[in-house]
Image (cartoon, rainbow, N blue to C red):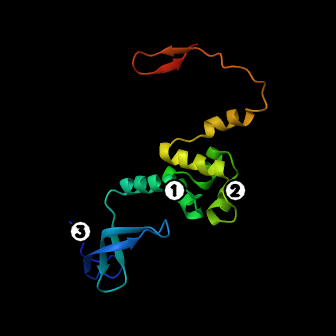
Amino acid sequence: MRKQRCVQCAGHMVAHQEDYPYRSLPGVVLQGLTVWRCQGCDAHEVDVPDPEGLHRALVNELVRKRERLAPSEIRFLRKYLGYSSKEFAEHIGVSPETVSRWETGAQSMAPVADRLVRLMALTKEPVGDYIDTMDKVGRLDVRPYEGKLRRLGNTGWETAV
């Protein structure tokens, strides 16, 4: 059962169905939410059902948009992934200052970084483990891959030692 008292003034809270702006992403409006408004003061509380589902839906929309990610969208995706600015920078191979400039709009994200962030958001997988390897590609001699793989029944493959 929902509390009927305001935590700020102890006034009576009344539920309304409203369209509510999503503060993390300017321009996004969540339609038909229950918003509890205090009759005694300006306080309000918003019920967001299935917040994880909402975030996944927003991620799916962001990764499919044709334009580059906007600063607020970069910040949203970083937070969705659960990273601090420093951790995010480490995972994609840039400095924390670069992440800050992207999120404030002081610097545009390069198209390759934009695609990388979208891929991370879709898979929820960091790419930092591969940054060192990818960084060395192009500075090495060209040789074909000569690894051996072993089949694991119907479950997949592993590198054979």
Above or below, comparing residue 138 to residue 85 in the picture: above
> Which of the 4 image quadrants contains residue 12?
bottom left
Residue toward you, 139 or 85: 139
Q: Position of residue 149 (x, y in %)?
A: 55, 16
Q: Residue 53 carries which label?
A: none
Kind of residue at disc 2: Thr
Residue toward you, 34 or 66: 66
Which residue is drawn at the image coordinates 76% and 33% (left, top)? Answer: 138
Q: In which quarter of the image is the C terminus?
A: top right
Above or below, comparing residue 67 to residue 129 in the picture: below
Q: Which of marks 3 and 2 is nearer the N terminus?
A: 3
Kind of residue at disc 3: Arg
Which residue is drawn at the image coordinates 38% and 57% (left, top)? Answer: 54
Residue toward you, 47 or 158: 158
Q: How far apart are marks 1 and 2 (CA)?
A: 23 Å
> Which of the 4 image quadrants contains residue 1?
bottom left
Q: Which of marks 1 and 3 is nearer the N terminus?
A: 3
